[in-house]
Amino acid sequence: MIDMHCHILPGLDDGAGDMDEAIHMANNAVKEGISTIIATPHHKNGRYDNSKENVVGNVEMLNELLIAKGIPLEVLPGQECRIFGEFLEEYESGNIMSLACSHFVLIELPSGHVPRYTERLLYDMQMKGLTPVIAHPERNSELTERPELLYSLVKNGALSQITAASVCGYFGKNIRKFSQHLIESNLAHFIASDAHNTASRSFCMQEAFQLINAKYGVEMVCLLKENAELLVRGQNVIKEIPEKIQKKKFLGLF
């Protein structure tokens, strides 16, 4: 299993605090059945700046230690980058990197709203050959109020990644139900841990896929897992035709 969004690199952001915690996270990931993690430290979110060079260097150090300790886990480089107006200029200058050296880029929206320039930026990214992957849209308050915004972005070529803990209900029942609606409406393409530690923000991947299997069947589980594999290989992912979340159904959340 591949986890394509995880804050395992030590000391770079609000994820693993040191190498011991990173190793603890790695051991927990292996117990969950995860064989590959894309390390995605925060970048340009107002608190953290982690350049491509910095991420790659830290990934190499962590992989060397994992090999030395005999932990069967591979870590690949990436970033979780907050969108901003000069995003493409920063990408072209080499400060923003894709996930696992693919054409997929993990982007983060502000938690409380969707910037007005988002649709244009995501369009411009695709014109440059990049595929934007929206991190945890189920936790964006404007998208929960106006899910048609996410529908429009996905319809126009963006992808989205739901957090495993959201599926499991650890962010509350409303976020859990909204996550279910996103899956049902083909508005979710990946499940990832967004793990930050082994206590309050752990992996929950097995639990999430068990719940998805029980509610939607093994085909949905296979699709979501295969998409992460396709992403790492730099291949196009499986996308079903997105559907609008019915307003009546959505209002039933609250």
Image (cartoon, grey):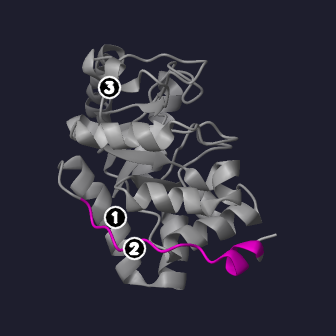
Circle 1 crowding by C-alpha within 10 Å: few under 14, some 14–19, many from 20: some
Closest to the observer: 140 or 209? 140
The quadrant of the image that shows the N terminus is bottom left
Amino acid type at mark 1: Lys
Give the answer, above or below, for where 235 lies relative to 219: above
Residue at position x 39%, y 82% from top? 218
Dot 2 falls on a residue whose secondary structure is helix
Q: Is residue 248 magenta?
A: yes
Classify residue 175 as left or right of residue 27. right
Q: Which mark is residue 221?
A: 2
Residue named by callout 3: 59
Residue at position x 26%, y 60% from top? 237
Residue 215 showing in the rendered view:
yes
Classify residue 167 as left or right of residue 253. left
Q: Residue furthest right?
A: 254
Q: State the image coordinates of residue 219 (x, y, percent, origin top left).
A: 35, 81
Part of the protein shown in magenta = 237-251
Residue named by callout 1: 225
How far is the residue under mark 1 from the one under mark 2? Answer: 6 Å
Q: State the image coordinates of residue 167 (x, y, percent, origin top left).
A: 60, 64
Q: Nearer the viewer, mark 3 or mark 2?
A: 2
Q: Earlier in the sequence, mark 1 or mark 3?
A: 3
Dot 3 falls on a residue whose secondary structure is helix
Q: Is residue 166 magenta?
A: no
How far is the residue under mark 1 from the one under mark 3? Answer: 23 Å
The quadrant of the image that shows the C terminus is bottom right
Q: Which mark is residue 159?
A: none
Amino acid type at mark 2: Val
Q: Nearer the viewer, mark 1 or mark 3?
A: 1
Q: State the image coordinates of residue 176 (x, y, percent, origin top left).
A: 67, 65
Q: Main secondary structure of the magenta part?
A: loop
